[in-house]
Amino acid sequence: MFKKAAVFTDIHFGLKGNSKVHNEDCEKFIDWYIDQSKQNNCETGIFCGDWHHNRNSLNLTTMDSTIRCLEKLGKSFEQFFMFVGNHDLYYKDKRDISSTEFAKHIPGIEIVEDFREVEDVALVPWLVGDEWKKISKCKAKYMFGHFELPHFYMNAMVQMPDTGELKAEHFQHQEYVFSGHFHKRQKQGKIHYLGNAFPHNYADAWDDKRGMMILDRENSKEPVYIDWPDCPKYRTTSLSKLLDPQNDIIKPNMYLRVTLDLPISYEEAQFIKETYINNHKCREITLIPQKQIEEISTELDITQFESVDEIVAKEITAIDSDNFNKKMLLDIYNEL
């Protein structure tokens, strides 16, 4: 099947309303991923799903970035497997129409749109219907997929509730399970969630462990994770901490959400924003009044989530205040 594979997932081309900046980040990530793959002698590339973000339509500028990157990937590996994720599908419960179907016409790209098992490796797209029943029957040592499993974290604060049919115990024959879908890198037993390619929003604040994974199957080595050092970063802080000369949190390409715990004028607020954007190369700085506990990101993208529960959980997570216990709020909401 493969000797050594370079794996990543959930890049979401077209995120933030087909943002030019986000798509450029995607292209920079692909260039970095290819370079790391070559340095580590990976002949196989694997993408575990959610190439596109918008499941209903594709913007032409996003398609332009998509095609350019897929052509690079097809030329850079002996084989590149591209899984169909839930965001790549028009329908939630069937794989009849996907936004990645065209990619099978790009040389070197192989679309994984059906459950397949080759040697000791299983490749699994987003499961629909009762396909989850195939998991417990699969004997493959390694399984790659786009799974939605309970008790794993969608991000740093929000844990997936115990819903759906597929459970961790169904992977009884596997030694390693690698999955996309949840954007926080994490591991429980044999199951590894790889995490998205790079941080996408404030749900990823203060968590830059994003990038790629390398699996040396030929030598039966443990997976190795490599973080993308130039990824966009999201930070939440207070104005007093931001202005503290001992606090060195500012990096280029950073998104900042700052709680105003000090009194400042409108002119001072504008000066702060201009200074950090122009002098420190921050991409965005949002100043939030102390009493305003809920600040929605500059683009609340409800299509990022599949249910009202997840939208509510995201907004609770976004609260930046020492006066509220976010974990307690999430627990209360989950019990309602």
Image: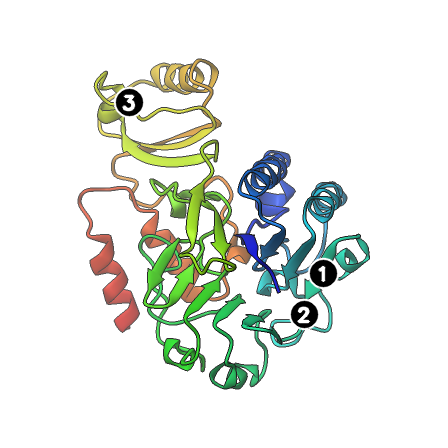
- The residue identified by callout 3 is 248
Q: Which numbered disc covers residue 234? A: none
Q: Position of residue 300 (x, y in %)?
A: 49, 48
Q: Residue furthest front?
A: 219
Quadrant in which residue 117 is drawn: bottom right
Residue 238 vs 171, above or below: the answer is: above
C-alpha distance separating marks 3 and 2:
46 Å
Quarter of the C terminus within the rendering? bottom left
Name the residue: 49% across, 51% down: 214
Q: Amino acid at mark 2?
A: Glu
Q: CA distance from mark 2 to mark 1?
A: 9 Å
Is residue 64 in view from this perspective?
yes
Q: Quick one: label 2, few (<14), some, or many (20+) residues within 10 Å?
A: many
> Mark 1 Cα within 10 Å, few/some/many (few <14, many 20+)?
some
The residue pinned by badge 2 equals 113
**Which secondary structure, mark 2?**
loop
At 33% from the left and 34% from the top, the residue drawn is 288
Count of residue discs = 3
Left or right placement of residue 175 versus residue 4 in this view: left
Q: Seen from this angle, which residue lies furthest right?
A: 105
Q: Amino acid at mark 1?
A: Glu
Q: Is residue 42 left or right of residue 65?
A: left
